[in-house]
């Protein structure tokens, strides 16, 4: 956490002033994801931008025919491959206050791990602990879990993970990472292989926490 706070630039947007409490709250949650991994402290990340509440981001959206449209989305967080994470402080604070109501920091920093380790596939390429060992098994298992989840959605079945986890493998990894920490027992019960996979990757076992 000390390295994270010292190395990353925190910038307030939309009139918000960055406080030490904000830095500590964000750093604590972001660093939980790498606490037991043999990795540096998000070395590719340069800046954390913080808005007071949800913000509007403009995106290009392509439909099935390949037609591009501009769409404004209200977001609580966003990760950029250029070394930036954008967060809404109201959602950061709400996520830190409870364990089962969503956590934008876990979600966006899982995206950061994905962006750094695979760049395009939405799946961390180097497997548990960021090493080459086990990467094929890791990737194959995560792909299988993603496809199985999408099949459940297609059938209209009930799932613990929300529908947006089926948007693409990257979103699946980020959402699953969020639920892995926030609702670990439920995830372990519904998708034990996915829970075990994420446990090996993050080197933590949230289901065993009091």
Image (cartoon, rainbow, N blue to C red):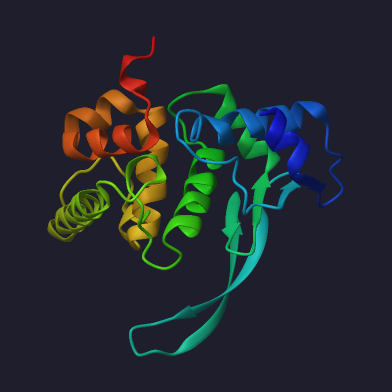
Describe residue 12's horizontal placement relative to residue 121 as left or right: right
Q: Is residue 6 visible?
A: yes
Q: Residue furthest top?
A: 210
Q: Is residue 183 left or right of residue 24?
A: left
Which quarter of the image is occupied by the C terminus?
Answer: top left
Closer-to-camera residue (161/107): 107
Q: Is residue 152 above or below residue 4?
A: below
The residue closer to the viewer here, 48 or 116, is 116
Residue 10 picture quarter: top right
Q: Decide if residue 93 is in sight here.
A: no
The residue under the point 44% across, 90% down is 67
Instruction: Give the residue displayed 12% in from the left and 57% down from the top.
Output: 155
Where residue 78 appears, as percent x and y from the top left, is 59, 55
Closest to the observer, 6 or 162: 6
Residue 109 position in % (x across, y down): 53, 45
The residue depicted at 36 percent of the width and 22 percent of the height is 206
Q: Quadrant of residue 193?
A: top left
Residue 18 in percent (x, y) is at 83, 38
Is 187 located above or below residue 136 in the figure? above
Residue 101 percent location from the top left of the image: 46, 31
Q: Quadrant where the N terminus lies?
A: top right
Q: Is residue 187 left or right of residue 56?
A: left
| Residue found 30% across the figure and 34% down from its top | 200
How many numbered marks appear? 0
């Amino acid at each position: 956490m000390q390295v994270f706070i010292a190395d990353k630039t925190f910038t307030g947007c939309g009139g918000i002033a960055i406080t030490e409490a904000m830095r500590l709250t964000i750093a604590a949650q972001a660093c939980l994801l790498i606490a037991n991994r043999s990795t540096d402290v998000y070395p590719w990340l340069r800046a954390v931008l913080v808005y007071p509440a949800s913000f509007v981001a403009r995106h290009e959206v392509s439909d099935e025919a390949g037609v591009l449209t501009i769409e404004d989305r209200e977001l609580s967080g966003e990760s950029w491959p250029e070394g930036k994470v954008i967060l809404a402080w109201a959602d950061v604070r709400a996520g830190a206050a409870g364990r089962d109501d969503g956590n934008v920091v876990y979600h966006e920093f899982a995206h950061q791990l994905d962006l750094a380790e695979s760049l395009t596939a939405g799946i961390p390429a180097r497997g548990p602990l960021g090493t080459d060992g086990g990467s094929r098994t890791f990737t194959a298992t995560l792909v299988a879990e993603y496809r199985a989840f999408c099949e459940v959605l297609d059938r209209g079945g009930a799932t613990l993970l929300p529908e947006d986890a089926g948007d693409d493998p990257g979103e699946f990894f980020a959402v699953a990472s969020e639920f892995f920490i926030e609702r670990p027992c439920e995830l372990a019960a519904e998708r034990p292989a996915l829970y075990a996979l994420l446990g090996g990757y993050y080197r933590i076992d949230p289901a065993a926490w009091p």
